[in-house]
Every structure is written in structure tokens, then in C-alpha cells.
Image (tube, rainbow, N blue to C red):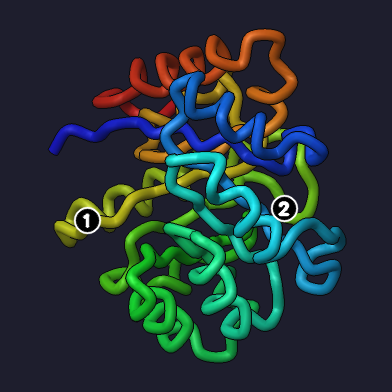
Amino acid sequence: MTRAIRIAPSLLSADFAFLGRDAQAMADGGADILHFDVMDNHYVPNLTVGPLVCAALRPHTSLPIDVHLMTRPVDPLIDSFAEAGADMITFHPEASDHVHRSVQMIRKRGLKAGVALNPASPLSLLDHILEDLDLVLIMSVNPGFGGQSFIPSALPKIAALRKRIDDAGLPVAIEVDGGVNPANARALGAAGADILVAGSAIFGASDRAKAIASIRGAAESGLGQEAA
């Protein structure tokens, strides 16, 4: 099956005084998804935004909003973000007392459900939940801050997950978040990524549309190739 690369700019790197403007610019620039990072200064050492900001942003974009919960607990926020206009909710299994229940809650609201794996989190955490997911987010940095450098050990992890998904014939997307840029996007596409989250590589560029196109083009050049 032919894979299509989707680009998800991370609003963590946007200008928070002009989120609506930046969100619209991402749609105009060719982005496919908006990545919305939620940090609680508990599960991760940073504090960002919540459902009220998501709800305020929703009227300003037609792009799907991909909410990445870096919070503990998870379940109390699911309904709040569903009501705020999220299209996808991803959470860390270490932060949920009952992972399957959390996934069920997300799916019950009609949203796509994902699980995020930190750099040291094994793929075995997916053993009894993978078939219930819409996506798996592989963290290629430790969660909590934007602008970190890509951790290369994410590549074999992505490749192993790609094989597992394909062998099982599951319609599960692989998303990658952390240090993504045009220089490593080809290797990510080759390893099996479907959705690339990029923050500073897009919002720090003088031409954001060109940055989106560069990341997409590099990733697409790796499709069908062996992982580097």
C-alpha cells in the first residue's frame, strides 16, 4: 500500500500571541495537520496550553487538530478536548491507569486515538492495544520542550513498528515528533513514518511554506527505501 507523508507543524513553536494567524498560515502553506502540545508541569517539566486555547483556535483553521497529551492523569481531559474541537488525541501509556479505557473514551467521542512512546518506552507497551489505535506517536526527543535534537535510535524503533503494523495489516499511522527537519526526513520516510511533526524547523524558517515542502519532499524521497 502506498503511503502518503503528512506534515504536522507543532504549535509549540508558533507565536502564542498570534496562534490563529499562525494556524491559518500553516493551512495556506500546505500543512496537513496541526499538532497541539499539552504539557502539565507534572508528567513533563513544562506547562503549556489547555482546552480553552484549543477551543479558541478551532474557528481559525479547517485543519485537523492533533492533541498530544503530556499529562497525568489522561482521562479527565479527553471530554474537554473533544468538546474544544480536537480531531485526534494521543497520550502516553505511562500516564494512564487504564490504557484501553482511555483509548475507548477517545474513540467513543468520535476522535482518532493514539498512544505516544517516549525514547526509552518499548514497543511492547503496544502488545494489547495496537489494533485499537489509529496512530502511534514515536517520540524522537524526550517530551517537555521544543527545539531539541533528534535521537537517532528512533529510526530502528520506527522501522520495527512499521513491520509490525504491515505484517498485521493494520491501518495504524506512525507519527514522529522531535527534532524533525529536512536533513532527517528522508530517513524517517524510509523507516516507515507517515506523519512528521516539526516545530522550529517550520516556524523558525523565513519561508514556512517552503520548509513544509522541503520536509515533505525529503520524506517522500525515502519511501520504498531501506532505512538509513
- Counting from the top left corner in percent of width and height, residue 205 is at 70, 15
Q: Residue at x 37, y 63 (%)?
A: 112
Q: Residue at x 53, y 42 (%)?
A: 34
88 vs 51, left or right, is: left
Asked if residue 32 can be seen in this view, the reply is yes
Q: Amino acid at mark 1?
A: Pro
Asked if residue 186 can be seen in this view, the reply is no
152 vs 172, left or right, is: right
Q: Which mark is residue 142?
A: 2
Task: Indicate whether 117 appears above or below 126.
Answer: above
Identify which residue, 196 or 67, lies in the foreground. Answer: 67
- Counting from the top left corner in percent of width and height, residue 184 is at 55, 24
Pointers 2 and 1 in contact (C-beta within 8 Å): no
Q: Nearer the viewer, mark 2 or mark 1?
A: 1
Identify the secondary structure beneath mark 1: loop
Identify which residue, 36 or 124, lies in the foreground. Answer: 36
Q: Amino acid at mark 2?
A: Asn
- Counting from the top left corner in percent of width and height, residue 227 is at 39, 30
Few, some or many C-alpha atoms within 10 Å of disc 1 (few <14, some 14-19, many ≥20)? few
- Counting from the top left corner in percent of width and height, residue 33 is at 46, 40
Identify which residue, 67 or 186, lies in the foreground. Answer: 67
Q: Can you say which quadrant of the picture contains the N terminus?
A: top left
Identify the secondary structure beneath mark 2: loop
Q: Which residue is disc 1 drawn over?
A: 171
Q: Which mark is residue 14?
A: none
The quadrant where residue 93 appears? bottom right
Identify which residue, 168 or 12, lies in the foreground. Answer: 12
| Mark nearer the N terminus (2 vs 1) | 2
101 vs 5, left or right, is: right
